Image (tube, helix red, strand yellow):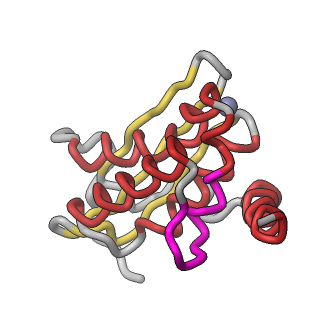
Amino acid sequence: MSDLSDLYQQVILDHNRRPRNRGKLPTATRVAHGDNPSCGDQCSVYLDLEGDRIKDLSFDGSGCAISQASASLMTTQLKGKTAAEAQKLYDEFHHIVTTGEAPEEISDIAAFAGVHAFPARIKCATLGWHAALNALKGDEAPATTESHTD
Ligand code: ZN
């Protein structure tokens, strides 16, 4: 199990050092902000939705290593997913961070299983995901929906 813990720690460190999809997304059609005052974490999530599917997304924010690594990982997990698939992934992630029960197969989101031992940090780990789900549910489109090529 210690080998797995090391591996998981590597995932968190890696996302913290080299955040994926960080920064404002110019093509975003939805944005939502997450705030975790108990730790001082902030996270904004930008979504480029195509119908019900997340065509692209990014996050921006500041805070502790867990909050930022989790938001970074979240963007890699949700790209290309539908709203329903995103909700399902969040449910899995939430189960992992609250119970420490990781799935059989090693996946990056299982890296956060250790968070369950630190209940105060669960909010850090779920902050970016909450922001993403809020953005998915949002009816308003604060950002423009200008057409673009990619
Ligand atoms: Zn935090």
Q: Is residue 104 magenta?
A: yes
Q: Which residue corresponds to the image point at 22% horizontal and 41% vertical from the top-left?
A: 138
> Residue at the location (31% across, 66% down)?
54
Left-right relation of 105 to 27: right
Quadrant holding the N terminus? bottom right
Q: Is residue 11 above or below residue 121?
A: below
Quadrant where the C terminus is found in the figure: bottom left
Residue displayed at 77% across by 54% down:
16
Quarter assignment of residue 121: top right
Residue 52 appears at what percent x and percent y? 17, 65
- In front here: 2 or 66? 2
In the picture provided, is 140 more to the left or to the right than 11?
A: left
Magenta-drawn segment:
102-113
Q: Is residue 143 magenta?
A: no
Residue 91, how many percent across, how many down?
35, 52
Q: Which quarter of the picture shows residue 102?
A: bottom right
Where in the figure is residue 27, as x and y percent of width and height? 39, 62
Residue situated furthest top in the rendering: 38
